[in-house]
Amino acid sequence: MSSASPRREPLRNRLRGWLRQHAYSCIYSIGNLFRHPLATLMTAAVLGLALCLPLLLWVLMGNLEGLRKLDTLESITVFVAGEALDRTDGSSMPLHIDALINELGTWETVASVDSISPDQGLAELQDSGGFGSALELLEENPLPWVLQVIPDTDDAGALEQLLQRLEQHPGIESAQADWRWLQRLQGILQLARNTLQLLAVLFGVGVILVISNTIRLDIQNRQDEIDVLALAGATNSFIRRPFLYTGFWYGALGGLTAILILLLAALWVGDELAHLADAYSQETSLWLPSVQFLAVLTVCCGILGQAGAFIAVNRRLRDLNPV
Amino acid sequence: MQQVNLNYPPDAEGMVVFRQVCKRHRGGIRALDDVNFSLQQGELAFLTGHSGAGKSSILRLVSMQERATRGQVLVNKRDLSRLGRSWVPHIRRNMGLIFQDHRLLMNKPVFDNVALPLVIAGLSYSDIRKRVAAALDKVGLGERSKAFPGMLSTGQQQRVGIARAIVHMPPLLLADEPTGNLDPELSATLMQLFLQLNELGMTILIASHDLELIRQLGRRVLVLRDGQLIDDVPARQQISPGAEPG
């Protein structure tokens, strides 16, 4: 029998046989899913619901991260003193504003300074604030010159010092920083990020367990077939393979269902988000993961499914070969 | 039908050799006790004895469904007790197993049932189709390849089981009570089939308690009683009517 060792088979023949076995297992597993469409859909729905929660949370976080990254929210808004003087000619820059911009530009913690004239401010307010008709009633532009100071640091202490220094400057009436709520948002995002990681792990384990249990039931139903395969000389890999494919399909279908739920949710909240963005004077749209990412996600869910199937079928195989 | 797939080189010691084999089940129940025999390549032999005599135990040891508690079981010089688990599929792929209860997959058509060993071996579909057709023709079921086992009679199911066992033309065929549920006429037909396979070079070991049938074929008979081999009747020698089986 030594001459009959499978190791003596030519590599090409073995590879060909191996590919045929994979093709057989793959087609067989797909056929098996179609033979029980209701059970397949139910399993996919359960997995999809389990997977969509971390996915939705992740997309929500992605959108909030988008808000955090908006440059205009990472600046200090400076209201220049002496508006009465400037109001007489809001279109050209007075000398003292120009001097102030130059002075602030030399500060170590300032990256750049942009100016917004009263006329520009009024135009922006008319465009975005919804005060168009009310503003028309004003006899003169009440807005001061405004400077947008972009800090050159992320350090909270340095930013605080910069804000205080600006407020104490004689040419500045007041200064407002937008990063405080961003810092709070950052804290919330960090918490959400940690929660997301925990949820992803928990639901990942959940997917493995659900698929493991589904495959275990499948194995029970096909007990006779497995016994016959083993007696006909099937290796553990051969017996395991269709179940691994089935686990992969279950996981991938669950992932696709979760993506479908995500897209439906995006359609549902899209208008609300547009209203919210409008209220913040932001032209933003709902951020959704890329198609490539969703494809990778589907494959990852499939691999989770395979892991669940592997656990279930290996337990059965241990019982099958007691010799 | 092609010739037997002689993966095994001819061996003077025999295709199947039992040397002082003992098998005890849990609780110390003795299944086999100091069994010694050798089955030559190309030989057809019967194992006979009353229920529980140890016929099935011998087949289970040869097919590595169990291991001997003591002694050596050799299949073409390879000591099965020394082989690891990973060898089990390879050993089984070089033999055909026939069961009394057929062990067919009722949710698969006859073709798929018979094709199983070839699918496991990774053969191409065209090869599988040809070989399955040849095996089904051999057992007289060439026209029933699309039928499901539930649509067939017991005898036809048994023939499907035989087709599955011989489709890859293994050098060794083990049959456990293959005629147990069949009428005498059908049993005789199946035995003729075994004789034809044997003529192709297949080594065949059949466990049976059908003494009349065994006597008609006049082949070698190993008689078991309470796990012991009590007689080894050579071919063309008759077993007395009062012998063990019954």
Image (tube, coloured by chain):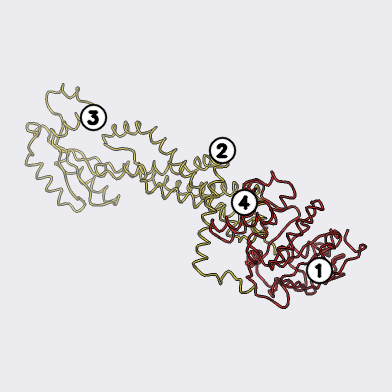
Q: Where does label 1 land, which residue? A: B220
Residue A222 percent location from the top left of the image: 64, 49
| Mark 3 and mark 1 residues within 8 Å of each other at the beta carbon | no
Label 2: element kind: helix
Q: Secondary structure at mark 3?
A: loop
Q: Which residue is mark 2?
A: A38
In the image, residue B55 sits, relative to residue A224, either above or below, namely below
Given the image, on which type of amino acid does mark 1 rest? Arg
Q: Earlier in the sequence, mark 3 or mark 2?
A: 2
Spatial CA span between label 3 and label 1: 104 Å
Residue closest to the eye, B149 or B213: B213
Q: Is A266 left or right of A245, judged from the image as shown?
A: left
**Which label sits on residue A129?**
3
Left or right: residue B51 versus residue A7 is right
Mark in the foreground, 3 or 2? 2
Residue B149 lies, in percent from the top left, at 68, 47
Rendering quarter of residue B224: bottom right
Q: How many angstroms separate mark 3 from mark 4 (CA)?
A: 76 Å
Chain in red colour: B
Q: Residue A117, position in %: x, y? A: 13, 36
